[in-house]
Image (cartoon, rainbow, N blue to C red):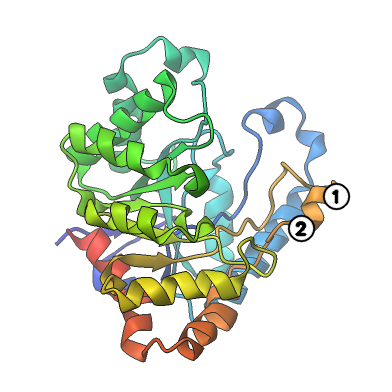
């Protein structure tokens, strides 16, 4: 059975994952800004908020947090290791690349397999010279759709997956149904859809789109729950309940896409509306709402424990 690498160098078996959040961020930063202007960041505040967010989730019953922060989102394995050391939480790091349009110039001129090699290095050797190895692959397809560079990243992620066996967790724009294009490219590369989570699909209430994705065999990441989310929690839980009633409970994963800190909005009016730090919201608010919508304890366990285990154990 495949073991799962954790931030800090430890590994666990899939059955040790427990209640798992599939999509959360200990910290998100604009790529490269810290290297040029480190004085613009309050490191102590970022660390404190990340520790508080993780401790809050653990206190609410969460056992494992999957953090899909990769190139393009300011990934910092050493920061992640500090947070894990302070919290003793199980955190799984990712490899991959986050862009909606273009690759950095260095990668734009390289072939797909060069990029795949970088991802494999993170999985097999470690991230940024640390003991932390990546346990899954992340990429994004947003409003611009599948640009040539985005397609290169998806194909590289697919090839790294086929070489290493780690699962894939994506970012999509659900309102533009960009997950379908991801599945098409992954299928063309030979990826088993049962190893793929199409992310952020809870941002739509279009059940026809969600069922089309499910018909392709992927998992759905209903992973943007939050007190200020749109659609709001009540409508999001109604979508989950409807999918469970249609027999898809074993293909759904829950999370918040919370960022303990995110420099995109810090100090701006938009930042006031962000779901910053709410890594316990699924446990404290969403699960009770789902129970109120008629879901059973087994349904809840399937989405939060059994499905993550099956995703990682293949």
Instruction: Name the quarter where the N terminus is drawn.
Output: bottom left
Q: Are marks 2 and 1 in contact (CB under 8 Å)?
A: yes
Residue 218, image quadrant: bottom left
Look at 66% across and 58% down and name the residue there.
260
Q: Residue furthest top?
A: 109
Residue 230, image quadrant: bottom right
Foreground pick, 241 / 303: 241
Q: Secondary structure at mark 1?
A: helix
Is residue 289 among what the camera can see?
yes
Look at 42% across and 28% down and name the residue there.
146
Looking at the image, residue 278 sits to the left or right of residue 109; the answer is right
Q: Position of residue 305 (x, y in %)?
A: 33, 75
Residue 13, image quadrant: bottom left
* Residue underneath mark 2: 273
Q: CA distance from mark 2 to mark 1?
A: 8 Å
Q: Position of residue 110 (x, y in %)?
A: 36, 12
Q: Position of residue 254 (x, y in %)?
A: 44, 67
> Where is 195 relative to 22, above or below?
above
Image disc number at residue 80: none
Look at 48% across and 49% down and name the residue there.
174
Specify few, some or many for label 1: CA neighbours under 10 Å numbering under 14, 14-19, or 20 or more.
few
Is residue 60 among what the camera can see?
no
Foreground pick, 173 / 153: 173
Image disc number at residue 269: 1
Q: Position of residue 306 (x, y in %)?
A: 28, 74
Foreground pick, 243 / 126: 243
Q: Secondary structure at mark 2?
A: helix
Looking at the image, residue 210 sits to the left or right of residue 53; the answer is left
Instruction: Name the quarter where the C terminus is drawn.
Output: bottom left
């Amino acid at each position: 059975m495949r073991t799962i690498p954790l931030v800090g160098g430890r590994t666990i078996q899939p059955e040790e994952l427990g209640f798992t959040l599939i999509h959360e961020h200990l910290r998100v930063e604009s790529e490269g800004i810290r290297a040029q202007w480190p004085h613009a960041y309050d490191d102590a505040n970022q660390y404190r908020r990340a520790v508080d967010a993780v401790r809050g989730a653990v206190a609410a019953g969460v056992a494992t947090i999957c953090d899909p922060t990769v190139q393009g989102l300011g990934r910092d394995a050493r920061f992640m290791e500090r947070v894990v050391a302070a919290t003793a939480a199980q955190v799984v790091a990712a490899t991959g690349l986050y862009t909606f349009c273009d690759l950095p110039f260095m990668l734009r001129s390289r072939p797909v397999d060069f990029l795949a090699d970088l991802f494999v290095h993170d999985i097999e050797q470690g991230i940024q010279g640390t003991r932390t190895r990546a346990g899954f692959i992340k990429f994004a397809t947003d409003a611009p759709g599948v640009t040539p560079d985005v397609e290169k990243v998806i194909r590289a992620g697919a090839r790294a997956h086929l070489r290493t066996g780690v699962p894939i967790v994506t970012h999509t724009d659900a309102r533009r149904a960009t997950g379908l294009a991801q599945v098409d490219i992954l299928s063309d590369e030979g990826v088993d859809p049962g190893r793929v989570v199409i992310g952020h699909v809870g941002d739509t209430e279009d059940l026809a789109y969600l069922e089309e994705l499910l018909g392709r065999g992927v998992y759905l990441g209903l992973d943007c729950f939050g007190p200020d989310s749109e659609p709001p929690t009540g409508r999001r839980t109604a979508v989950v309940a409807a999918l469970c009633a249609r027999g898809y409970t074993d293909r759904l994963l829950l999370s918040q896409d919370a960022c303990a800190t995110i420099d995109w909005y810090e100090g701006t009016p938009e930042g006031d509306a962000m779901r910053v730090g709410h890594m316990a919201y699924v446990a404290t608010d969403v699960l009770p709402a789902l129970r109120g919508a008629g879901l059973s304890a087994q349904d809840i366990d399937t989405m939060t424990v059994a499905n993550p285990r099956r995703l990682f154990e293949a």
